[in-house]
Image (tube, rainbow, N blue to C red):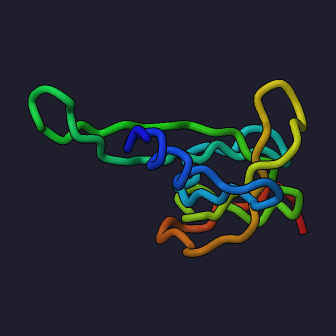
Amino acid sequence: MDTNAAANRARQPRRGQKVLRVGVVDSISGSKTVRVVLDNLVKHRLYGKYVRRRSRLMAHDEQQAARLGDTVEIAQCRPISKRKSWRVVRVLKRSELPEPLSTEAE
């Protein structure tokens, strides 16, 4: 048996298990959509140098809890729109950025 195939199967979740990722919110587009950036380091096959890879995923934020710079946990779900197939599960760490001023007059 090929060791790469076994390693790939071990990395993939079993049927019925949720795929969870942790990333940082770098954009809030729309009322219930956030863009989450996932950074990881991959070793180059030939040179052995570590290369930084970045994935940007659109995630559905129903409660609108995530703010810019927050570290969030997202889970894969059914397609919500053309580019949204992830949803925000919870906010792990709040950002140090100041709160944006509200536009509503009190």
For this rendering, which residue is in front, 37 or 105?
Answer: 37
Residue 48, position as x, y percentages in the image: 11, 37
Residue 41, position as x, y percentages in the image: 30, 46
Residue 80, position as x, y percentages in the image: 90, 38
For this rendering, which residue is in front, 11 or 101?
Answer: 11
Q: In this view, does 46 lie above or below 41?
A: above
Location of the C terminus by quadrant is bottom right
Residue 4, position as x, y percentages in the image: 40, 40
Q: Is residue 25 above or below residue 53?
A: below
**Which residue occupies 55% across, 75% down?**
93
For this rendering, which residue is in front, 100 or 47?
Answer: 47
**Which residue occupies 47% across, 39% down?**
5
**Which residue occupies 63% across, 39% down?**
57
For this rendering, which residue is in front, 31 or 21?
Answer: 21
Location of the N terminus by quadrant is top left
**Could you tell me how many numbered marks the image carries?**
0
**Which residue occupies 57% across, 64% down?**
70
Q: Is residue 13 left or right of residue 97?
A: right
Question: In the picture, residue 72 is in which quadrant?
Answer: bottom right
Q: Residue furthest bottom?
A: 93
Q: In this view, does 71 lie above or below 4?
A: below
